[in-house]
Image (tube, rainbow, N blue to C red):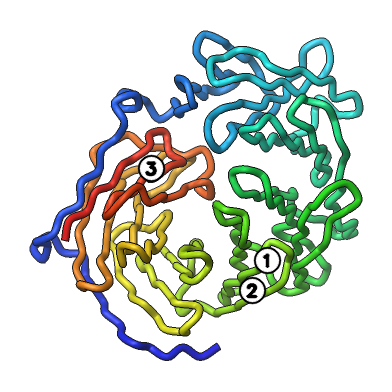
């Protein structure tokens, strides 16, 4: 698709140019959190090597674990007398326990994907996903194995926070002769799942489901070539684009109208309906997540250097596209992320935003 550039502005981030401002604050409940403490609906969870602590509940040597998007539940796979799936509330109370009869306690690919309503999915054996209902009962399993004789990377799951749209994907499939590919499938229910993306030449760099579950974005790579794909929740491809630069990720906003691409030092926003590039900016720091909020005509970018979950030199930058103005705040905070792909920016009011997915929720207020 060829883009008509309605206008393009290139803003260099320079402290001398700022007459605007952005302030970033954290909840008082989170202000004392270390990089190993993450917020839950009530209290927090501390993540240490070989140990989780929820309130006063210690969980030693968990094989796998996951926090639900809203922090209401924590799912844990742990060997007790047998291997169990355990579900804890945000106060540390044990809510559910289900024996995992056919699971291998030594399986290093175990993973837990927990939802706020109590549903969960547990991964084992590289590519097998077992679905649990809100009561902790096993419903069914889905094998996402490609059966490639050359092997495949561990399958991953992506979903919206409510678990309405669930996608299983193979990031890398070895096809022999040095060739690699990837694929993704939507799970609608037991014996009801469709492969909607397959490539014999492109690997999946990132796959995300929008917060409302309506769209799926995939960033693929083939050598130095990257491509952004957008699908609806039924797997119909709506749009593809080859970004100008190497990207770290993409996000979708405004009811699927705006695509934001972000890289180590640049953010670009496109209007997918008109085909216009809305705006772009450069950054001194790597951009870890960015999105466009059309109601405020603003790009919000969170940057820093990520190392084993720890984020050094964190920054928040807000660009007002309509006024061609920019504001930036360097954050003197100890920040960390369990999964950088779970970062989310929500609009709370005029020029007010909430950044979630870190060890502290950050409230962002801009003024132009």
Q: Are marks 2 and 1 in contact (CB under 8 Å)?
A: yes
Gap in angstroms between the C-alphas marked 2 and 1: 6 Å
- Mark positioned earlier in the residue sequence (3 or 2): 2
Element type at mark 3: strand
Q: In this view, does 174 lie to the left or right of 66?
A: right
Residue 340 against residue 272 in the figure, above or below = above
- Mark positioned earlier in the residue sequence (2 or 1): 1
**Relative depth, front residue between 50 and 296:** 296
- Mark positioned earlier in the residue sequence (3 or 1): 1
Looking at the image, which residue is at 86% across and 35% down? Answer: 139
Element type at mark 2: strand
**Which mark identifies residue 311?**
3
Q: Is residue 20 left or right of residue 137?
A: left
Give the quadrant of residue 298.
Answer: bottom left
Residue 15 in picture, x, y percent from top left: 13, 60
Q: Name the residue under label 2.
A: 222
Looking at the image, which residue is at 26% across and 77% down? Answer: 10
Residue 319 against residue 168 in the figure, above or below = below
Gap in angstroms between the C-alphas marked 3 and 2: 28 Å
Q: Name the residue under label 1.
A: 203
Q: Is residue 217 left or right of residue 347?
A: right
Quadrant of the frame with the C terminus: bottom left
Q: How crowded is mark 3: few (under 14 residues within 10 Å), some or many (20 or more)?
A: many
């Amino acid at each position: 698709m060829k883009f008509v550039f309605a206008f393009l502005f290139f803003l260099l981030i320079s402290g001398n140019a700022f007459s605007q401002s952005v302030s970033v604050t954290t909840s008082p409940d989170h202000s004392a959190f270390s990089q190993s403490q993450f917020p839950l609906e009530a209290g927090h969870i501390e993540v240490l090597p070989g140990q989780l602590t929820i309130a006063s509940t210690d969980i030693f040597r968990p094989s796998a674990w996951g926090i639900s998007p809203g922090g209401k539940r924590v799912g844990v796979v742990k060997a007790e007398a047998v291997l169990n799936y355990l579900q804890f509330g945000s106060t540390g109370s044990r809510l559910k326990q289900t024996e995992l009869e056919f699971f291998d306690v030594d399986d290093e690919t175990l993973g837990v994907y927990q939802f706020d309503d109590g549903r969960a999915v547990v991964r084992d054996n590289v590519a097998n996903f077992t679905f649990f209902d809100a009561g902790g009962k096993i419903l069914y399993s889905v094998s996402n194995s490609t059966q490639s004789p050359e092997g495949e990377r561990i399958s991953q799951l992506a979903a919206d926070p409510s678990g309405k749209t669930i996608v299983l994907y193979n990031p890398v499939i070895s096809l022999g002769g040095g060739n690699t590919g990837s694929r993704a499938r939507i799970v609608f229910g037991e014996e009801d799942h469709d492969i909607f993306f397959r490539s014999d030449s492109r690997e999946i760099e990132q796959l995300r489901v929008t917060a409302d579950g309506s769209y799926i974005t995939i960033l693929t790579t083939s050598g130095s070539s990257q491509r952004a794909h957008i699908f609806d929740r039924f797997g119909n491809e709506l749009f593809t684009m080859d970004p100008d630069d190497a990207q770290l990720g993409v996000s979708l906003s405004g009811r699927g109208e705006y695509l934001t691409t972000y890289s180590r030092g640049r953010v670009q926003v496109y209007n997918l309906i008109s085909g216009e590039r809305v705006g772009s900016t450069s950054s001194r720091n790597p951009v870890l997540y960015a999105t466009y909020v059309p109601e405020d005509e603003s790009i919000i970018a969170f940057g820093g250097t990520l190392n084993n979950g720890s984020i050094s030199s964190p920054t928040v930058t807000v660009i007002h596209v309509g006024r061609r103005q920019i504001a930036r705040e360097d954050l003197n905070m100890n920040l960390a992320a369990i999964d950088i792909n779970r970062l989310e920016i929500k609009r709370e009011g005029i020029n007010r935003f909430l950044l979630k997915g870190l060890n502290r929720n950050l409230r962002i207020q801009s003024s132009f």
